[in-house]
Amino acid sequence: MGKFAAGLTALYIRLVYATSNVIYKGRRDLLFENETFAVGFWHGSSFCYYPQLRGRGDIIITTRHKRGDLIADVGRKFGYVPFHMPDESDPDTTLLDIRRMLGGAAKNHICYSMDGPLGPYHVPQRFFLTTAWLAKKRVLPVSVEVRRKITLKKRWDKYIIPLPFARITFTFHEPLEVKKNRFDELIGDIQRVMDGG
């Protein structure tokens, strides 16, 4: 069932992109230069992101959960390399997992939802910043705006499913440096950049 659902999801995403007006703003050009980034987007707009770096072998971080399995399967269909992190574990295990993943990430972008997997809504998680810091990658925040969509308002992330013939606007913001002693400040910086606050 999981593979079948992933196949249908990937097919639908391709249909949406084939019929939609996709607009890029900001620094998307950076994705195709020498530097690699921790590419971050909100969990609610993650459905829109799959085609952005297709076929490059970049890492997409998921959780060890049914939701994460679906994301991993869909990601593979677009050429990503999924890396499963535990939903909850002790810090030592998490750190070992991160280091194992980073061993293969030097030449790849790392892509993930900054406020996932369970929120709170539009609050970057410290795990996201820790991963970027350990990988020595700057954060490249990506905002998504969709016209013609379904919004799942009862979900914590207000998940967006674009409809065919949509208008999808991606804004690739200026990269942000990650310093361990200013995580709290960086969380606020990312929120202001992403949400225009």
Image (cartoon, helix red, strand yellow):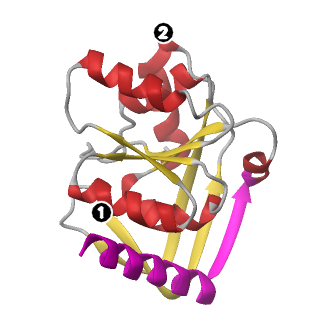
Magenta stretch, main secondary structure, is helix
Q: Is residue 83 above or below residue 94?
A: below
Asked if residue 12 is among those painted magenta in the image, a careful observer would answer: yes
Please tell me which residue lies in front, 180 or 62. 62
Q: Position of residue 143 (x, y in %)?
A: 54, 55
Which one is earlier in the sequence, the residue at label 1 or at label 2?
A: 1
As rendered, which of 194 and 106 lies closer to the eye? Answer: 106
Tell me the quarter of the picture where residue 47 sits: bottom left
Q: Residue at x 75, y 35 (%)?
A: 35
Q: Is residue 7 visible?
A: yes
Q: What's drawn in magenta, residue-wise?
A: 1-28
123 left or right, relative to 19 = left
Compared across the picture, whether 25 is left or right of 85 comes to right
Query: Quarter of the image holding residue 51?
Result: bottom right
Secondary structure at numbered mark 2: helix
Q: Secondary structure at mark 1?
A: loop
Magenta span contains residue 171:
no
Q: Pointer 1 and pointer 2: residues touching (CB < 8 Å)?
A: no
Identify the residue at horizontal 62%, vertical 42% (top origin): 109
**In this orientation, does residue 45 appear?**
no
Within 10 Å of disc 1 (Cα), the crowding (few <14, some 14-19, many 20+) is: some
Q: CA distance from mark 1 to mark 2?
A: 31 Å
Kindly identify the amino acid type of the residue bearing the numbered disc 1: Lys
Residue beneath disc 1 = 158
> What's the residue type where badge 2 is placed?
Asn
Q: Is residue 50 above or below residue 196?
A: below
Residue occupying image coordinates x 47% and y 21%: 185
For disc 2, the marked residue is 181
Determine the residue positioned at 55% across, 15% down: 179
